Image: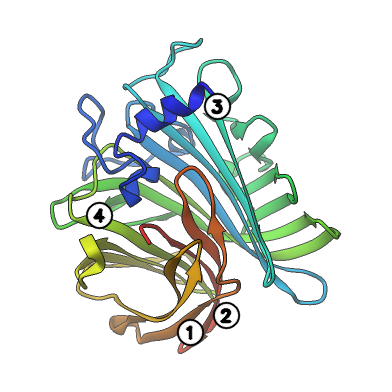
Amino acid sequence: MRLLPLILMALAAGPAQPQGFAGMGADAPGFALPERGHVLEFPRDHGAHPDFRIEWWYLTANLEGPDGTPMGAQWTLFRFGLAPGARDGWDSPQGWMAHAGVTTPDAHFAAERFARDGIGQAGVTADPFAAWLDDWHMTSVAGPGADALDALHLAARGMEFAFDLRAEADGPLVLHGDAGFSVKSEGGQASHYYSQPFYRITGEVTLPDGPIAVTGLGWLDREWSSQPLEGAASGWDWFAMHFDDGEKLMIARVRSEADTGGWFSAATWIDAEGATQTFGPDAPRFTPLETARVAGRDVPVRWRVELPPRGLDVEVSAVNPQAWMDTAFAYWEGPVRITGTHPGVGYLEMTGY
């Protein structure tokens, strides 16, 4: 438990600020800042960036069992820096936190782990690619000459669940914003952000009643930054959508304090071959349609999401409204169904409620 104060210090915004779990709610002097025009390079940028304050490796999967029952799985590794740089041994200023979850229509399971840097308990290597915390891992199994993220083996377990999955990409990496420079606010705060949204998933999910063979679609997000969100930010709503025609959409908003109706939003439309079109804050529209009482708070679990320049007008509904990640910095995360002009499936993350 001595690690928890380290993580809490790294999340200097503190648990009272809803965006704090992602480490972007407080100033971070001395750390590197994202730069427009910086060229992302792979496999280098699949690895850790310890000169930046916060980053994550974040895979979500929309799955089905043999009988068609929908479910979701999440595997996430966060790195937090108290100071720039990494060192071997116990004096490394980096800390790690991992989240894993499984969601079915009737149940939601979540687990969380913490680790120190510098002693081998957790970390990320770029080449060969591997991310791990204890026995939770996301490891490249790509063949020679392929991008390291083209094929992954990932596994995690909690008290009542486990999963062992294989992810095979059938499309390219996608850069968000301006060649991976993703603006988060009117003040210009930004991150470096790319995704691999083209995974086909196979494997096994184990629930209290036993193992279930699963197939489905996966989406990996990679993001790092040192910049805080604007002071008025109260949280965010992030949607990753897989449409039945093979196209994809990342669409998100950062909400203003007290959710007065103000927000900063962005979207990336991804065609079936991986070509992208980026949209700024004037294009996306978000309308909560229904809330559910979740962990003592009202959380939107059914949405209307519109992107008029692409003719998108969809309704997004939670597979399980109670998909609450009851972790040290709690949030809602779960699979969704999409109906309307572009039917499909996806994942939704909401913080600050």
Tell me how many marks there are.
4
User: Which label's residue is closer to the chain start, 3 or 1?
Assistant: 3
Closer to the eye: label 4 or 3: 3
Q: Position of residue 244 (x, y in %)?
A: 57, 80
Closer to the camera, 157 or 345?
A: 157
The label shown at residue 115 is 3
Q: CA distance from mark 4 to mark 2?
A: 29 Å
Query: Which quarter of the rendering shows the N terminus?
Result: top right
Foreground mark, 3 or 1? 3
**Nearest to the observer: residue 143 or residue 258:** 258
Real-space CA distance between mark 2 and mark 3, rounded to the nearest whole angstrom: 39 Å
Q: Are marks 2 and 1 in contact (CB under 8 Å)?
A: yes
State whether residue 51 is above or below residue 76.
Answer: above
Q: Nearer the viewer, residue 253 or 35?
A: 253
Q: Which residue is mark 2?
A: 244
- Mark 4 or 3 closer to N-term? 3
The secondary element bearing badge 3 is classed as strand
Marks 2 and 1, how far apart in space? 7 Å
| Residue hosting label 1 | 342
In this rendering, is residue 184 above or below 323?
Answer: above
Which colouring convention does the figure follow?
rainbow
- Residue 256 visible in rendering: yes
Badge number at residue 184: 4
- Which circle, 2 or 3, is nearer the viewer? 3
Q: Earlier in the sequence, mark 4 or mark 2?
A: 4
